[in-house]
Amino acid sequence: MIFNLVDRLARRGLVRGEPVEIDFPLRQHHIADATGLTPVHVSTVLREFRRGGLITISNRSLTLLDQDGLRRIADMR
């Protein structure tokens, strides 16, 4: 889901820098609703992504710190 969002935003010129940063006004309950997951599960996954140094979320923006690591996780699921 994250890579699909980044790809769509990149086509519109809305992706910044390296590492990749995008505006991310979504809250955990929005992500849960869109994916059919519980807010608790979304919170757990995002916390693990942060702890693993894969992403940061702050000031309504999402930064992909380790795209290769995220892709590895996506391929495992």
Image (spheres, grey):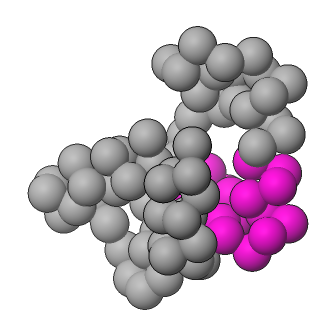
In the rendered view, tell whether residue 26 sits above or below residue 56.
above
Whether the magenta-drawn stretch holds residue 40 is answered as: no
| Residue 38 vs residue 72, the one in the foreground | 72
Q: Which residues are magenta?
A: 46-62
| Residue 50 vs residue 17, the one in the foreground | 50
Q: Choose top left, top right, bottom left or bottom right for residue 31.
A: top right
Residue 64 in picture, x, y percent from top left: 54, 69
Q: Choose top left, top right, bottom left or bottom right for residue 36.
A: top right
Image quadrant where one finds the N terminus: top left
Residue 58 in picture, x, y percent from top left: 70, 59
For image coordinates 22% across by 61% down, the residue present is 10
Image quadrant where one finds the C terminus: top right
Residue 75 in picture, x, y percent from top left: 48, 54
In this picture, residue 55 sits left or right of residue 71: right
Whether the magenta-drawn stretch holds residue 50 is answered as: yes
For image coordinates 32% across by 66% down, the residue present is 15
